[in-house]
Amino acid sequence: MKTYYIAADIGGTTVKMGLYQEPSGWVEKWEIPTRTENGGAQILPDVADTIAQTCAKHGVSMDDVAGIGVGVPGPVLRDGTVNGCVNLGWGVFNVAETLGGLTHLPVYVANDANIAALGEQWKGAGSAYQSVVLLTLGTGVGGGVILDGKIVTGAVGGAGEVGHMPVVEPVEGVVCNCGKDNCLELAGSATGVLRSAKRYLAASDAPSAMRAIEKLTAKDVCDCCAAGDEMAQQCIKLATDALGRAIASIGCVLNPEAFLFGGGMAAAGELLLAPIRKVYRENVFPPLRETPVLRATLGNEAGITGGVRLIQVSQQA
């Protein structure tokens, strides 16, 4: 029986990697730079090289490796074809076939938010449940849907793109990278919170502790909100109202056992989660009001944890 698994979570700056052995756990976790020049041509060869080096270092034969689970920042079709990853310089090509050819191992590929959700469902905040939805609050709002322990990808790999749900009121001059002006991430992401704060500060002379902060961040807005700053509270309310309405809509369609929130801004904890729960309960179909809304727990390891689980689930299918 093959007991070793390799995971790669490919981001725009680094590739997080892990060598896992069942049942003992992680043998090693490491990172390599993501070389995005020349259309990202060197990314997968670099991944293949570091896999060979790490396995050799630990005396692990490739014959004992069950496969490689890969997360990428873009939509992925069921056959492992990436439907474009702008941050990596990739167009449309089959990552599973390419990396499989370099390593001679089975390769399973999914969107990075989806494998993070799978990791949280397996070993993190969602481990008591089989069906969860993860929202990651960072530069944008990412999402992953796990139903009955499996990733929901959709027809063209776009399931879980919750950041682009049309749930916010348009603001003149504010447009999402996707081209729409009503996306959830325009208000609910760290970028959105910071944008709201700057807009409010410019539109009013009202006092705010945020005015004294030279390089304002979303964390600063959260901290000012916690300290009772009224303008910061308005910014956070805008975000939590949008996020609460979004998961109410998701709940009415999918009825997951739990909602999980991860990403950098989720570190604010109950400052965000408590009002999100309130808005969710006010807007969702009444029988679904008690669905838990929890903070994700795996942090930066969610992707590689999900990569391991992706191999297991794929091979059990």
Image: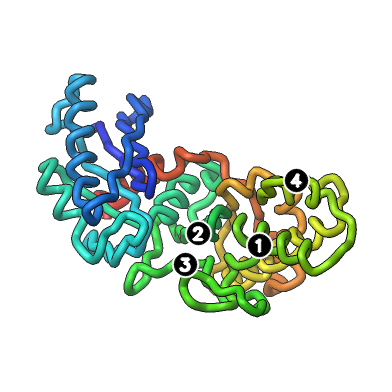
- Where is residue 282? Give x, y as percent: 76, 70
At mark 1, the secondary structure is helix
At mark 3, the secondary structure is loop
- Where is residue 108? Give x, y as percent: 25, 51
- Cα separation, mark 3 vs mark 1, equals 21 Å
At mark 2, the secondary structure is strand
Which residue occupies 62% across, 69% down? Answer: 246
Residue with the mark numbered 2: 142
- Cα separation, mark 3 vs mark 4, equals 33 Å
- Contact flag, marks 2 and 4 (Cβ < 8 Å): no
> Quick one: label 4, few (<14), some, or many (20+) residues within 10 Å?
few
Which label lies toward us, 3 or 1? Answer: 1
Q: Is residue 255 left or right of residue 225?
A: left
Depth check: 165 or 315 in front? 165
Which label lies toward us, 1 or 4? Answer: 4
Which label lies toward us, 2 or 4? Answer: 4
